[in-house]
Image (tube, rainbow, N blue to C red):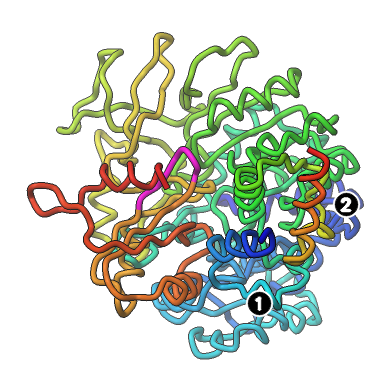
Amino acid sequence: MLRDEIKEIMEELRPDLDMETETDLIDRGTLDSFDIISLVSELNDAFDIHISVEDLVPENLNTLDAMVQLVERHQQED
Amino acid sequence: MSVCLTDYLENSARRFADKPALTENGGVVCTYRELRDAARRAAAALARQNVQGTVLVMAGRSIQAVQAILAVLYAGAAYAPLDPTSPPARLRDICAALDKPPVLCTRQQLARCPALTELCGQVLVWEELIESAPDDALLENRRQSVRPDQTLCVMFTSGSTGVPKGVVKTHAAMDAFETAFISQFSLTDRANWGNQSPFYFDASAKELYSVLRTGATMHILSTGLFSQPLELVRTLNALQIDTISWVPSALCILSRMDVFSVEKPAFLQRIFFVGEVFPIEHFRIWQAALPDVAFTNLYGPTETAGIGCWYTVPAAFSGQVLPIGGPLPGVTVQLRDENGRIIEQPDVQGEIWLGGETLAKEYLNDPERTARMFVSENGMRFYRTGDLAGRDGQGLLVFRSRADHQIKHMGHRIELGEIEARAGAFPGVDRCCCVHDTAKERLILFYQGAAPMKELYIYLRRELPRYMVPARLVPCEMLPCNANGKLDRPAMTKRAEEL
């Protein structure tokens, strides 16, 4: 499932976070710029999508569910 | 009277009293007059409490951090800036190296880190200091006491044994650097700087003192902006930022995300990059997007004030590696062979030795290392950088590699041995090896032993600064060794690239 795959990517990137309970990942600075860049490149590779710079706003990355929606949107559009 | 860097602020506060010296988050402004007043108020309180020696300053990305640094200098003391989000182990090591220093922090920082009370000799709370009365006579007295070789700051850098080492720099060295730097690049009060380097990072000093001396404005960019590249570019434009000095890792965030196809920084005129090699494919994206901007590569280890060498990249540059160029005025740069002899031939590689007035004074409490790394010859002091370089066809210096296991990652210099020493201290890590995957710009730690990966990661986040925490932890049955039983680093580097 898409959600599990994204969760797995995040767990590899940040083993210290429990993605089921984390919120405001960007707004609180839990994910820093280097996490974001790694995450985007992992998501692009894993789902063959192209996340653009305009997608990098807190609404799209603050929670696991927001990330799932972002990837789903791209899978439909790309 | 010998030089003191608070003179920069004194002069600029006279010339540009109501001009913004610093801004924060786009909105909060601190004029030169306000900066001077806040620093001098707090300094008077420090002087009355007889604060001396080196003060640990919790220095985040804020106007307050600059005010605190200057307060310490006005009080005639030196500062050691520290990331307020430092892991506890780092704080403990640095406090031990400084032998229970006084610490200057905000109320909030103290609440977040109560251990400061135990680790430091004297806890100086910013909000209390700035409430006290100014005392011009007392500060004048402190100003007069500043000696030519007075310590300005102690900057901590990664140490291969697992303990960070302190580099002691003087007012005179930083002043010699700023004189050369400002004149070389014709920096003036009209510059609008966009600050990326936090004030606990060595690279920020050259920028901060340039701004204060020329009377320019520094806009402190918040960390969060670097997670939102488009917002970052819009902020640069809204603030009309024309000068930046960033680490290539930060510049690469913009080029990697292709932000220029949506919006370009419209006001930039000069980009300095410093701290690590700028990957050429990313440099070309920047240069193509901003053809009228001057791009200058700066090179200098923590053991000098500011930088030693520079190279402004011509529009027609077609090489594969950006040279580090040649020395700033007043700096001597030489290539030496293994026996310390000067290399004259153009095509022979050697170690970079830097000499001149801008060198650091010493390593903190480490005369043996100081004597080994800082050598005097015919009345000139040299620092042996450990950086291996050659000269290209035009005689420009080109960095090739390190003579040891020191690497550059996210603009920070890191001893892989420090990461290995920390990881090796974790129960269930029998042996480990950290390698730098330069292609993906990440650190990978291979380890042997029963330690669970998640616990090891959490431990390393607590022990090491963020930029030293490996991106991947890879448990192994057995680490590869060469015929002599030593860790086979090349084999592991290759494996890291395949992950």
What residue is disc 1 on?
B105
Q: Which secondary structure lies at badge 1?
A: strand
Looking at the image, can residue A51 be seen? Answer: yes
Residue B31 in the image: above or below residue B113:
above
**Neighbourhood count class around disc 1 (C-alpha, 10 Å): few under 14, some 14–19, many 20 upward:** many
Q: Residue at x 33, y 27 (%)?
A: B334
- On whether residue B189 falls in the magenta region, the answer is no
Type of the residue with mark 2: Ala
Magenta stretch bounds = B435-441
Type of the residue with mark 1: Cys
- Between B368 and B463, the one nearer to me in the picture: B463
Of the image marks 1 and 2, the number of the one nearer the N terminus: 2
Q: Marks 2 and 1: in contact by CB < 8 Å?
A: no
In this image, B354 relative to A47: left or right? left
What residue is disc 2 on?
B17
**Neighbourhood count class around disc 2 (C-alpha, 10 Å): few under 14, some 14–19, many 20 upward:** some
